[in-house]
Image (tube, rainbow, N blue to C red):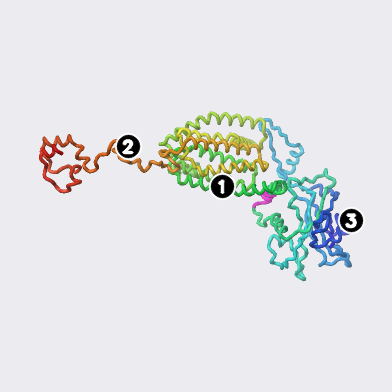
Amino acid sequence: MNLHVYISEHEHFTDFNATSALFWEQHDLVYGDWTSGENSDGCYEHFAELDIPQSVQQNGSIYIHVYFTKSGFHPDPRQKALYRRLATVHMSRMINKYKRRRFQKTKNLLTGETEADPEMIKRAEDYGPVEVISHWHPNITINIVDDHTPWVKGSVPPPLDQYVKFDAVSGDYYPIIYFNDYWNLQKDYYPINESLASLPLRVSFCPLSLWRWQLYAAQSTKSPWNFLGDELYEQSDEEQDSVKVALLETNPYLLALTIIVSIVHSVFEFLAFKNDIQFWNSRQSLEGLSVRSVFFGVFQSFVVLLYILDNETNFVVQVSVFIGVLIDLWKITKVMDVRLDREHKVAGLFPRPTFKDKSTYIESSTKVYDDMAFRYLSWILFPLLGCYAVYSLLYLEHKGWYSWVLSMLYGFLLTFGFITMTPQLFINYKLKSVAHLPWRMLTYKALNTFIDDLFAFVIKMPVMYRIGCLRDDVVFFIYLYQRWIYRVDPTRVNEFGMSGEAPTAAAPVAEAPTAAGALPPPPAPAPATATTAAAREEASTPPPAKPTQGASSATEPQEAPPKPAEDKKRD
């Protein structure tokens, strides 16, 4: 068969006689040949510079048209002697790609100056903050699928059905042509503008097996249920780049380790959430736990959520952070008594929520230590917050005052967030105990932190994120040190508000001399023999009608005659 490749501005190509449109022509190809070509792999390639017209420079489209014909035939239908419908298969597509370029209009809030390119500022004023621009990638591969499966029309599974074309008369299907640009990274695309007079293009032809075609088609096809918008798919393409780069550049053993560690990370993340919810759900006492740290954690999670919404972060990240905020809000109901005051409504419509410390928190010494820790913490926290706010305002650019507040708080929490963990360390130090901590959840989160350290070395990440991983490691090692110095003590309270001596706490006071070494008194006659003074007093007074139950009712349930005085003395 012969290969004909044409480049045109038109989506439907008919100008076969234009020599400028013919980009590549390769004769005597064999279907299913895996041994020919320069590298004996069945592949051929052609490279040339394309002279682009003015319409393409001004954000127009450009198409590639590929025709395979049996040897001796031509793809032009007007050449009646050389054209045959069943001997020709055709496929075309747009080879430029339209991408959104977003302009973040930022400035110094005090001076109004910006370091952005003046030309970019002018384009943002003319076209808005989001501009759709045509981009170019110099490589594209034409694959013809080497497959003899007897496909029947209507039975081809998606997404393969959109590539298989059947003949309306015979019911047979044409050879499957697939444009493969899976390995074209998003970072390698560059915009087409009036400064470019020509564009480089390398077109490759290779046979492709069925199972590899299925993998490529499944990865490259977008869902027809596009309810999340094109912007989400653009983010998905950019995120796939990191996976492709890892597959291309990472050592296979390190890549396999990364995949395994990623799965373990997901499992530990799920277990950490589960044990965290289970711990707070079954918690009966707040002794040893910092309630203020829970509130500060809610504030921190809420700031992170607002920050990623303001900066258009990935949708999946937004959902995960939102779930974390909901869990933190639920914790408030476990550490405080939350009530709705329906008498005093907010704006006259909504009940006012009221918060009250639980009795187990007020009655314990934890509240005193918690207040003390946060008082000491404020001496460090607020000066650092003020310094960071001034630095961010003087030297960084922001979209507005709202963005400045969010970015300032987010950067501060990311840099100095470890300070918020110190109240719990202080409470542990004062109580000389760590039994009240959710150690399972802490262990899972610590393991995830160590996994994040591994990713920080393998994958490119912001420096601030690496600092956050390091500070979490340091705090967890401090927790481990406290667990080592505060050994197991049966009298200390565990995470369920109980101690090892709880069953014996209600023992009678009379057993205290036994622990000191004294012999216990006889069990039955103890009340009678111990009251010698009472017996002498009874000798000088007439005996009562009934004896005291403590002396004789245990042995004589019925009435007995009074004893003589001599017998009482002998007793």
Where residue 300 appears, as percent x and y from the top left, is 56, 39
422 displayed left or right of 68: left
- Tell whether position 424 is magenta: no
Magenta part of the chain: 228-237
* Residue 149 or residue 570, whichever sits in front: 570
Give whichever of discs 1 and 3 has the lower sequence position: 3
Q: Quadrant of residue 530?
A: top left
Whole-number angstrom distance, CA of label 2 to CA of label 3: 110 Å
Where residue 570 appears, as percent x and y from the top left, is 14, 38
Q: Secondary structure at mark 1?
A: helix
Q: Main secondary structure of the magenta part?
A: helix
* Residue 538 or residue 108, whichever sits in front: 538
On-image quarter of the N terminus: bottom right
Q: Quadrant of residue 225?
A: bottom right
Whole-number angstrom distance, CA of label 1 to CA of label 3: 62 Å
Badge 1: how crowded within 10 Å, few (<14), some, or many (20+)? Answer: some
Where residue 410 appears, as percent x and y from the top left, is 60, 37
Identify the residue at image location x=77%, y=65%: 174
Q: Which mark is residue 268?
A: 1
Residue at mark 3: 19
- Tell whether position 230 is magenta: yes
Evaluate if marks 1 and 2 touch, with contact meaning CB atoms under 8 Å apart.
no
Q: Quadrant of residue 476?
A: top right
Badge 2: how crowded within 10 Å, few (<14), some, or many (20+)? Answer: few
* Residue 496 or residue 299, whichever sits in front: 496
Residue at mark 2: 515
251 displayed left or right of 422: right
Give whichever of discs 2 and 3 has the lower sequence position: 3
Where residue 96 appears, as percent x and y from the top left, is 78, 51
Badge 3: how crowded within 10 Å, few (<14), some, or many (20+)? Answer: few
